[in-house]
Image (tube, grey):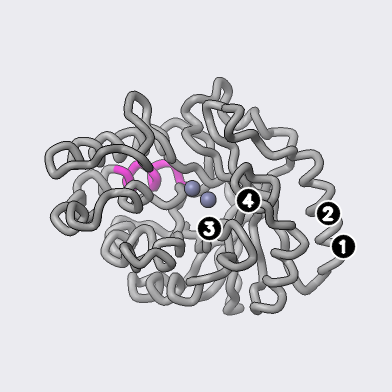
Amino acid sequence: MCRLNFSDKNMMCDYHLHSEFSFDSSEKIEAICEKAVQSGIREIAITDHAEFPVRDSAPWPDFRRRAEVLDFCRTRFGENLIIRSGVEAGQPWHCDCPGKEWSGENLDFVLASVHELDGYPDPRTYAYTPENTSNFIHTYLMQMTAMAEKCDYDVLGHVTYLFRFIPEEIVRAIPPESFMEEYEALFRTVLSRGKGIEVNCSGLRMPSIGKTLPSLELLRLYRELGGEIVTVGSDGHSCRSAFTGLETGYQVLRDAGFSYATSFEKRIPAFYKI
Ligand SMILES: [Zn+2]
Ligand SMILES: [Zn+2]
């Protein structure tokens, strides 16, 4: 049974950060921690990539080595910063024994994301046209809903990720908000499992998007359906991008009707005032 902890302290946390233990980042965890303290961040979760299927091009973190670095940083930064051990699991429906992959790694937080679709080309390089995009988005949302239903996770990552790669003129015609029925089904699945979603601030750094992933409108829908568990993260892959957009992310959450955001310790949610 989940214990729910509430804190009335206003604080900022970043629950989506990549370090040199991710295949696509070279940032030292210690440097991220230093910037967090300088930026007035109270708590961080390092969510390095573990992509399924496991490929040579996207090797998994060395969790043992990372645990040593995290412990070193906890000692160094002490009371000034709470440092959580997380993972961003990509397409975890491919794992044979959900949750067992890292059961020995003592994780605080598991973010589940869809970066690739089964049976489709890479979303980053797909040849989107006005004719094929709607079907591609539909498939993305179906596969994410299936993941939300059966995988081991705490929070779903960037639920409008695909829209990062679709040409602007197509997104204008079919924005994420034109898939409300599919998003409602996704959120209801998340809620039925007692899980959550994130406000990913990376979209704010992209001029073609300029919004959080997901947007205010979708966060309102999640809230109306009873959504309470929500983390906020920059998805920073370097000290430069770490913690950017968090204040806007919290404002979007407040505008969507949230008074609390969520942090995790040993996979148990706690709520802090925003
Ligand atoms: Zn991601
Ligand atoms: Zn990420």
Residue ID for mark 2: 71
In the picture, measured across the screen, residue 221 lies left or right of residue 149, that is left
For the N terminus, which image quadrant? Answer: top right
- Which residue is under mark 3? 235
- Which callout, 4 or 3, points to the residue nearer the camera? 4
Give the answer, above or below, for where 256 lies relative to 192.
below
User: How far apart in space, not on screen, are marks 1 and 4 (Cα)?
Assistant: 24 Å
Q: Main secondary structure of the magenta part?
A: helix
Image location of residue 65, percent across then percent down: 81, 42
Cα separation, mark 4 vs mark 3, equals 11 Å
In the rendered structure, which disc, 4 or 3, sits on the residue that comes first in sequence?
A: 4
Q: Which residues are magenta?
A: 186-195
Q: Which residue is mark 1?
A: 75
* Circles 4 and 3 in contact, beta carbons < 8 Å: no
| Front one among 17 and 27 | 27
Q: Is mark 3 within 8 Å of ligand 2?
A: yes
Dot placed on the residue nearer the N-terminal end, 2 or 3: 2
Q: Amino acid at mark 2?
A: Asp
| Residue pointed to by mark 4 | 25
Query: Is-magenta flag for residue 192?
Result: yes
Q: Is residue 4 visible?
A: no
Which mark's residue is nearer the viewer, 1 or 3?
3
Give the Cα separation between the discs numbered 4 and 2. Answer: 20 Å
Which residue shows up at 43% across the image and 75% down it? 248
What is the spatial separation of the Cα atoms under label 2 and label 3, in whole angstroms? 22 Å
**Label 3 neighbourhood size at 10 Å, few (<14), some (14-19), many (20+)?**
many
| Magenta span includes 28 | no
Label 1 lies in ligand 2 vicinity (Cβ under 8 Å)? no
Mark 2 and mark 1: Cα distance apart in space = 6 Å
**Contact between labelled residues 3 and 2, with CB atoms less than 8 Å apart:** no
